Structure formats: structure tokens, C-alpha cells
Amino acid sequence: MKKLDMILILDFGSQFTQLIARRLREMKVYCEIHPYSLDVLNFIKGNKFNLKGIVLSGGPSSVLDKNAPKISETLVGYFTNNEIPVLGVCYGMQLISYLEGGKIHKSKYREYGHSQINLAKKSSLFQNVKKDSVVWMSHGDSLDKIPNGFIITSKSSNGIISSIENAEKNIYCVQFHPEVHHTVEGKKILKNFAFSICRVKNKFTAGSFVEDKIAEIKQIVKGDNVICALSGGVDSSVAAVLVSKAIGKQLHCIHIDNGLMRKDESKKVVELFAKNFKIKIKLVDASKLFLQRLHNVKDPEKKRKIIGKTFIDIFEQEAKKIKNAKYLVQGTLYPDVIESVSFKGPSAVIKTHHNVGGLPKKMNLKLIEPFRELFKDEVREIGLKLGLPEYFINRHPFPGPGLAIRILSAVSKEKLNLLRDVDEIYMKELHDKNLYSKIWQAFSVLMPVQTVGVMGDERSYENVVGIRAVTSSDGMTADFYHFEQNFLRHLSNRIINEVKGVNRVVYDISTKPPATIEWE
């Protein structure tokens, strides 16, 4: 098996670190994000990849702070000896400059947002980049004196040093964020680093991944049985088909109907995998138990925990019935891993990821997570490669806790049925108007309020439904979809007229950030 070329990203806490990985992966360059404290030299020795470059991310700290995150002197020496190309981004640039003897100062002018840079020198990093290019800045500290052996390759319109390099040492630094789409030629800069400087050649492809992963799973599992919690989401579905290709009838899938899914979801999932892929799948109807445990629960995080615990309770019971089961398949994705583990210890948790962190030890199952280092679009590409239907693969994301977190109050059977009916109308209209594929994610939510309305000649006091549709390239930032007013009017009329119990429809036009995509 040929080693895959990779670029290592050391994370110093930037909100944009994941975007660096996304941009590189879009170029089919395999990369991984690790905390800045990673023992890089040991990582290189024991890694199955061919390390071609290192990126130091931005971060919220100042290198002048007493406890600012640093890299080891050994690693600095490794860079200095030209062992591997390095790109420092924002804080990464300041850190390299500081460690190499440059001078950093608190800038009189904080640069945040759009800025224009003027290229001063020819550079491999800026090959085919305009001399006056628009970039995205986000920094308070600035470089006052560059380290010995470095040259200035650009300055901002404010006269602030915006990039430096030492080509002999293969060290390149930019003060701005090339990974952010506001940097007009950012992708070109990252491409230059990956291919012209790091000379990445052996690229990541869905085909090579499938072949290598099937061989790896065969080697790991051998004659043991494997269990998969097949929810019907894209991630678990593609994982199930991939593992099935590797071990066939040794895979046992369990689909738990929690009563919180879309209309006829469980029936469709079982039919697809049992008939089309000949996968062993058992349907467990646990909807009553889930609803019992969610009775009168309003807090979204409590909902998630109850749903997660109930799922595990049922799954444990079913797993015990499968003899010689040693492994569990999960569709964990790289963003789940990144968001659930802080770069330097405990961090604020926005929401609990149900599929990160493994299972209770008492289950005594080893994890198989074939997509732990992959992003969603990569998994979709692999799913198509494995023969999953396009309509299924390209469905919008659906949360693990299902409709429970789209009901902004206590969950009940009546509310679930109402929201399912709304969702069915919404999705059909999106498909009929050829809008579904243009939208990253669309869904409806049931508000915890009722409003006065007029239905015929009578006063009504009924539910409010919120409609959400966003566009995004990576899920980290999102904008609302700009529907035509006629579409919204038509959709609202259909929902109010056809779904009993709804008399008002509102459209969510908030962006991420500051809002999240989901409401809970």
C-alpha cells in the first residue's frame, strides 16, 4: 500500500483552523489537524503517511503573553534545518517570527476584515497571485522587525507587514487568513504551498480510500462479527455499505426506530439496505419508550442525553443477541472529532455530539470508525462510489436526536406528527421547484408559542412553524437562502391549509454565526 502524502495542521485555537483542512481536502490533499502540543517528531516516525508540509494555524493568543502557546525548541530546530516546508498563518506567522528572533508589538491599528496587500517580492507562495490582492485579516499584534534571513513579500495598505519568507529554510508566513473565502485568492495561495512548495503528488481519492479501507477492515476484523447502528443518515449508511464490502455477512446492522424520525423513514431505510445491498438489518421499534422518557422534557441538552442513553440501553440489549460480536461501526466524521476536543483542554460545548467518544466500557466492543478523518462531502463521494443512490447520498443533514430538537418544547406524538406533515410539504416543494440541491440544509421547527389567527370566519389560536434554509460551503458559516417571495407565500399557504394546528409560518433569515444552523 503506497503511503499517502499529507500536510499536518497544528492548531493554536483559531476559529478558522478547520477551514484550512477543508480547503486542502478540496484539492485532494490529505491533511490532519492536531493540537499545537503534538510531539511532531514522534508523529512523523510512527505515521503511515508521507508528511510533506506543516501549517501553523492562527489563534486568539498573543505571542507576547506569558502563557502563550508555543512549539518546542526541537521542532523549531527541525524547521530551521529545512527538513520540511512550513506555513505560518496569522498567529503562526507571529510565533515563527518571535522564535526566530523577530520583534512583535501591539499594533496601533487592529486589522480586522477585508484588507488589500501589495506584493513586494516574487515568491513561490504567491505564484500567479495579483500584486494587489484582497485578503481577510484578524489580528491585533504586528511584526515590527523580521527575523534574520527572512524577506518581506507583501505589506497591507496600512503599511503593516502581511507576509514574510525564508525560502532557503522553506518557511513561509502570512499575517492574513488564506483559508477564509473573503481572501479572494486564498485557495491559490494554499494550492501553491501544497503543490509548488510541499510537492504533494500522491493525492487522496475516493477510489483509493475505499480499496485501502476495505483491506484494512478485513485485516482487523478477520473472522469476528461486527455490529452497526444504522440510523439511515448518510454517515452510518455509507459506513455500513463499506464494511459490508469488506466482511459481508459478518456485519449485523440494527436500526432503532426512536419515533423521532421523518415520515416513513425507518421503513425506507430497512428496504434500501436489505433489498439493494443484502445487508443483515434488524428493525427495533422503540418509539414508545423514547417518548415516555422524553415526557415533559424541554431542555435540548437534556433531550440529547435522554435520547443518547435510551439508544444505548436498547442497543446494548440487541447487541448481546449477536454472538461473537467484537466490533462496532460508527459513522464519526472529522468535524465531530475536531469540535468535541479542544486544542488545549476543556472548551465551551455548543452541543453534544452523539457519536464521539465511543461506547460504555461494559459493552466491550472495539470501534471501527472508517470516516473519522473525513469530511461530509468526502463521505458522500465514497457513498456514490459504493453504489448508494444519489438522492439518498445528497440528502440534507439530519440531526442524531431527530425531530426532538426541532420541537422547541416538550416532545409529544401529536407534535411529531404535525412537524412531519410540515416537513413533508416543505421538502416536496423544494424538490418540485428544483431548489433542494441548491440548499445546504432545510428544515422546519415547531415553536413553543401559539398565536391568534383567522380560519374562515372563526378565530384560531394555534401553532407557529419556523422554516429554515441555509447555504454553506462547509457548515462552519452559513447564510439564509434567498427564496423568492412567491415561493414563501405558496409554501406558507400550503402548510397552513393542509396541516391542522398551524396558523402561522415564519422564515428564519439569521446567519451562522452568530446563530447556529439548527435551533437547538
Image (spheres, rainbow, N blue to C red):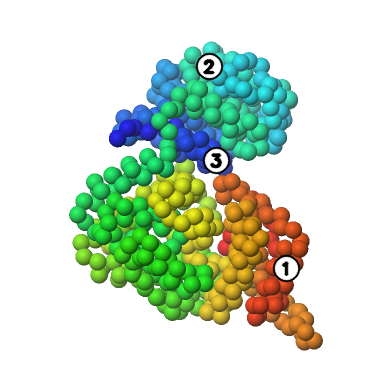
Residue type pointed to by label 1 = His
Q: Please identify the quarter of the rendering in which residue 491 is found.
A: bottom right
Q: Residue at x 61, y 15 (%)?
A: 122
Q: Secondary structure at mark 2?
A: strand
Nearer mark to the viewer, of 2 and 1: 1
Relative to 82, say whether 324 is above or below.
below
Distance, label 2 to label 1, CA atoms, is 60 Å
Residue type pointed to by label 3 = Leu
Q: Is residue 368 left or right of residue 350?
A: left
Q: Residues within 10 Å of mark 1 (few under 14, many from 20)?
A: few
Q: Residue at x 59, y 54 (%)?
A: 437
Residue 418: x %, y % from top left? 59, 76
Q: Secondary structure at mark 1?
A: helix
Distance, label 3 to label 2, CA atoms, is 25 Å
- Please report whichever mark, 3 or 1, sits nearer to the chain's N-terminal start: 3
Residue 509: x %, y % from top left? 70, 57
Give the residue number, with chain letter if any, for mark 3: 19
Relative to 393, say whether 496 is above or below.
below
Nearer mark to the viewer, of 3 and 2: 3
Residue 361: x %, y % from top left? 29, 59
Residue 392: x %, y % from top left? 48, 59
**Near-viewer residue (241 or 191):** 241
Give the residue number, with chain letter if any, for mark 1: 490
Q: Residues within 10 Å of mark 2 (few under 14, many from 20)?
A: some
Relative to 495, say whether 395 is above or below.
above
**Numbered circle sitting on residue 166:** 2
Quadrant containing the N terminus in the rendered view? top left
- Please report whichever mark, 3 or 2, sits nearer to the chain's N-terminal start: 3
Residue type pointed to by label 2 = Asn
